[in-house]
Structure formats: structure tokens, C-alpha cells
Image (cartoon, helix red, strand yellow):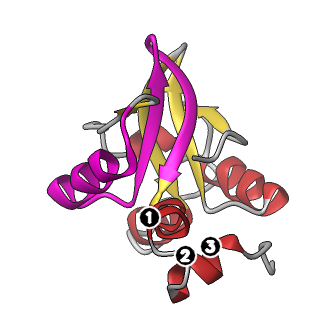
Amino acid sequence: MTTRLVTMDGHETLTAAAREMRDSSIGDVVVTAGDDVVGIVTDRDIAVRGVAEERDPDTTRLDQITTRDVITVSQYDDAVAAADLMRTYAVRRLPVIDDGRLVGLISMGDLAVEREPQSVLADISADDPNN
């Protein structure tokens, strides 16, 4: 689980999110409304749902491109439960919640490091970002 999270309000722009991702060397931000998790926006979402759809990244808000149905996992769930949720809902990241509070994010890469440490995905996920 990654605990170094970046959250942004849904009213922030795609440009602001892209800059935050660049500056933090990450590929996603958790979109919140107050203390509630309302979505995750990835660099791919910005490219596919924003730029490719000819949306203005300086005026398009994150809540305009994020998927609203957020699947979460409890911090007490194990890696198998997280993997099952990812498989069932075809998602690559799960916010980790404790008592309704966001405490982390688990990705497919995190699961690979935990469950298949010799895999290529685990090797890539364990390395420092190269950008």
C-alpha cells in the first residue's frame, strides 16, 4: 500500500492535476469532496478523457472526467481480497479506507511486489520513478 497520497478537490483542473503528478512523480491523484473519496484520476484519464476529447485542460475540472463509482478496500483486507476486487471491477487502483478515512492506495504494482516479487511488474513497481 502506498501511503504517500496526493488528493485533489474535484473542482481542480486537469492542468493542475497533471502538474501535481509531474512534480510528485506519480501517475494518479485521488479526487475528494471534503473528506469523501469520489474518484481517482490517472495520467491516462487526462490524456484519454480530457485531451483526446478536446477538452480544455485549463478549464476542465477533475470531477468532469473521473469515474464516480469508487471501489475501496479496508486496511484490514488482505492482498487476495484487493486482487479479487481489482479483477471483479476491472480497476488498477483501490483507495484504502479506515473508519471512513483515506489512509492509502493499493495498486496492481503493489500487489505484484507483495505476491509475485520475481515478476517484471514487481521489478518495475519497486524501482524509483524515472521521470
- Residue 40 pos. (x, y %): 46, 45
Please state if 62 lies on the left or on the right of 77 as rendered: right
Looking at the rendered structure, the secondary structure element under dot 3 is helix
Looking at this view, is 59 or 111 the one in front? Answer: 111
Q: Residue furthest left?
A: 88
Label 3 belongs to which residue?
125
Label 2 belongs to which residue?
117
Label 1 belongs to which residue?
108
Looking at the rendered structure, the secondary structure element under dot 1 is helix
Residue type pointed to by label 3: Ser
Q: Residue at x 74, y 76 (%)?
A: 127
Looking at the rendered structure, the secondary structure element under dot 2 is loop
- Does the magenta segment cover residue 101? yes
In the figure, residue 131 lies in which quadrant? Answer: bottom right
Give me the C-alpha separation between circle 2 and circle 3: 10 Å
Residue 10 seen in render: no
Callouts 1 and 2 close, C-beta under 8 Å: no
